[in-house]
Each structure stands twice: as C-alpha cells, then as structure tokens.
Image (tube, helix red, strand yellow):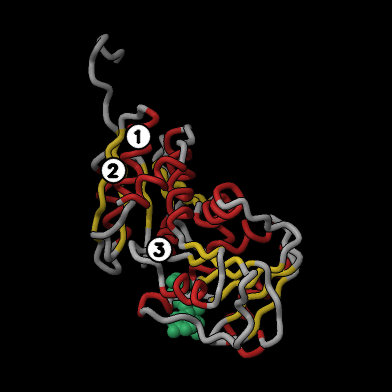
Amino acid sequence: MTPQPGATPAIDHYAVMGNPIRHSKSPLIHHLFAEQTGQAVSYEAILVERGGLADAVAAFKEEDGKGLNITVPFKQDAWQIADRLSPRAQRAGAVNTLAFQTDGTLFGDNTDGVGLVRDLTGNLGITLTGRRILMLGAGGAARGVLAPLLEQQPAALVIANRTIERAEQLAESFSDLGELSGMGFAALQGRHFDIIINATAAGLRGKVPDLPEGVIHADSCCYDLMYSSEPTAFVRHARALGVQQAYDGLGMLVEQAAESFQLWRGVFPATAPVIAALRRQ
Ligand code: ATR
C-alpha cells in the first residue's frame, strides 16, 4: 500500500541482545545514527538469559524485528543460529550482527574487526600495513578481529596469551592469511612492536596482562578493545609507561555499529560526531 502523503513512515525495529546489557551504549549510538540519517528506526537493549538466544531471536522475528546486534556472551551462539554467514563472520567463528532477510532467513555478519581497523586507520591515523602488531589474548575477542587486521598486511602479527596453546592454535588457524605466530607472554622478552592490541579479558577485573618489561615502550601504539567511562586498566598502564598513543575501544564500538547500520539500512552514518558525543557523556 502506498503511504498517504504526510503519513508517518513505518518504524523498523532493531535491538542488541546480551547479558549483561544494561550499560550498553548501542541504543544511544543507533538513535544518534537514525537521527543523523533520517531513518525511521527504533533500537532497544534486550537482556537474554544464558542459553536463551535462539528463543529470544525467534521472538524478535515474530514481532517483525529487522535486525539485531549480538554481544557478550552470545556471539558464538549467534554464529550457530544464522542460516547464512558473511565470509568474515565465517572466519571469526562469531556473529555480532544479524539481519532478518525478506525470504525469512537469518544472515549473520561480524563487523568487530572492520570496526577496529576503521578506528585505527581512519579515526586515529595509524598505518597497519608493514607494521609489527602484537595481539594480547587468544579468546573470542582476538579471533573476531584477526582476519580484517591481517587483510591490512602487517609485516608480522604475534598472538601472545597467558595459556600458550591457545595462542599457538589461534595463530595456526589463521596462518593462511598472513605472517603470524603464537606464544606466551614470557617469550615476548626483547621483542619490539609498533602496535599492541589488548584483547584479553584481564581489564574486567582491573588487571593487565603480565608482560615482560620493555615490551610496551613510549613509542608503542596501544589499543584496548575494551572501553569504559574511565580510562581502562590497559590504557592507564600504557600511559604510566610513557605511551602517548593509548586508546580505548570506544571508537571501535561506534565503527562496528556503523557497519551494522549500513548492512541494515544501506547508509553509512558519520561516526566522528557520535564518538565525540559519547566521549562528552
Ligand atoms: P573473550 O571472548 O572476551 O575473548 P575468552 O574467550 O574467555 O573471552 O578469552 C579471554 C581472554 O583473556 C583469554 O585470552 C584469556 O587468557 P587465557 O586463554 O589464558 O585464559 C585472557 N585473560 C583473561 N584474564 C587474564 C589475565 N588476568 N591476564 C592475562 N590474560 C587474561
């Protein structure tokens, strides 16, 4: 049916699902994107019980929802329930964006890695190509961003993890995409990196990975995938070691959201004003 002139356009519904979810910034980010681009969308945060993602997604689809962001701890579950995956989601083993297709199928994508690369290269002006990158951590967060990082063709990418085998396995499973190796923290002694990315969960307890002295030095560029209203433990640690370029993951959060928004709505919102608005909060 053709809408009447002047009629309010139908609103399309989106949401983020996670646990916990109360402090998610995604609703605010997507409201700002919608306002800026004039898109008629609503976006809410939905708390989902562990093990309950498939039911929650089905219920959202019943209510004619158009798409979802999926956050901790459900990204692997979302990967399982998607009918079709983008190559980058396939590779990441995790999905952070779901889109309900008109044919009734569920498409899964992962925009975390491209969001990180966009923040590093676009917003922060950091070149990845030809540089030596150290990735701290070998869990889901690290896995999710590896392929887009390797696409930038760094000179080398080292994955270091508390549990050495996990680092070795992760490096092995992405070894077709570039020059990478996996090791424990102690083996980093005496090595030099241009860019150090913290993808460990240590910051959740206010901790930082236990690195040998000298691995982080004043010229390192340090990036924490985590963010919070206060500087994160890793950012504070880097600054205390004299690092000038120490960043949290707020820019990545906004960039991955923008990629999701584009997938759903076909427009890419301007991210800089949204990052600035969140920083002011
Ligand atoms: P996520 O999906 O957030 O990556 P995960 O898969 O549980 O969660 O992985 C958590 C990562 O943080 C792992 O690399 C973990 O190291 P282990 O594999 O040795 O467990 C790392 N991690 C958690 N706490 C840490 C700490 N205090 N110091 C160093 N690494 C830590």
79, above or below 118, in the image:
below
Q: Closer to us: mark 2 or mark 3?
A: 3
Residue occupying the point 53% across, 63% down: 144
- Quarter of the image for residue 214 reads bottom right
Task: Look at the numbered disc 2 and give the secondary structure of its residue.
Answer: strand
**Looking at this view, is 255 or 238 the one in front?**
238
Where is mark 3, residue-wise?
227
Q: Nearer the viewer, mark 1 or mark 2?
A: 1
Q: Residues within 10 Å of mark 2 (few under 14, many from 20)?
A: many
Q: Which quadrant is home to the N terminus?
A: top left
**Residue toward you, 67 or 237:** 237
Determine whether the beta carbon of the residue marked 3 sits less than 8 angstroms from the nearest atom of ligand 1: no
- Tell me the amino acid under the disc marked 1: Ala
What residue would you read off at disc 1?
A: 34
Nearer to us in this view, 39 or 232: 232
- Looking at the image, which residue is at 46% across and 62% down? 248
